[in-house]
Image (cartoon, rainbow, N blue to C red):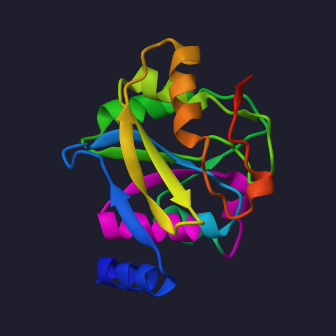
Amino acid sequence: MIKLISRWILTVLGWHIEVNMPPETKKAVLLVAPHTSNLDFFIGRLVFNVLGLKVKLLIKKEAFKFPFGGLLKKMGGVPVDRGRSSNLVTDLAAQFKAADEFILVITPEGSRKYRTYWRKGFYFIAREAQVPIALGFLDYKRKKAGIAKLLEPTGEIYKDFEVLKEFYKDGNARFPEQYCNEPAIK
């Protein structure tokens, strides 16, 4: 029922889904970019519902305050304390290895505000967990969302980031002035 309702909402809003990820993919770090608006979360959630993906989402811990905390956890939210150093990469890689299915959604920009670089933790999580990086997108201009392809991280981060930069360079964000389509590695 949730799948049908989500599809109906996306149709009413004029959005289309494109997926080029093999259906047998059960584990991946799913990048979603551009991310410039809170609306991205809701469009993305509807897309995941339609695709039948049970995803985990890294979300800043401040968002889990009442009244939204329980709902965010139920929707797959994982609170992250961005202010302290932790073993998040190792912990998430262990969760990948222990699970039969694990799709972790990460917005590589790490913020809805403009940044000159993307965070690279997603890359290290995928490498340590030995899972592909799925290239997800939200295109507000064409009203398309989905997953375009998988990238197997090679361990050559600069080379792999060139692939990511090429793929995401033409992203159509809701707020284009807040999107960095030429991310640097910091």
Q: Residue at x 42, y 15 (%)?
A: 154
The answer to whether residue 75 shows anywhere in this view is no
Q: Residue at x 36, y 41 (%)?
A: 149
Front residue of this view, candidates 171 and 44: 171
Query: Magenta region: which residues?
Result: 41-67
Residue 76, placed above or below residue 160: below
Residue 166, placed above or below residue 63: above
In percent of width and height, residue 126 lies at 44, 28
Quarter holding the C terminus is top right
State yes or no: residue 79 in magenta: no
Q: Residue at x 70, y 72 (%)?
A: 66
Q: For residue 117, what is the image quadrant?
A: top right
Front residue of this view, candidates 27 and 150: 150
In percent of width and height, residue 33 lies at 58, 49
Q: How many marks?
A: 0
In percent of width and height, residue 90 lies at 51, 25
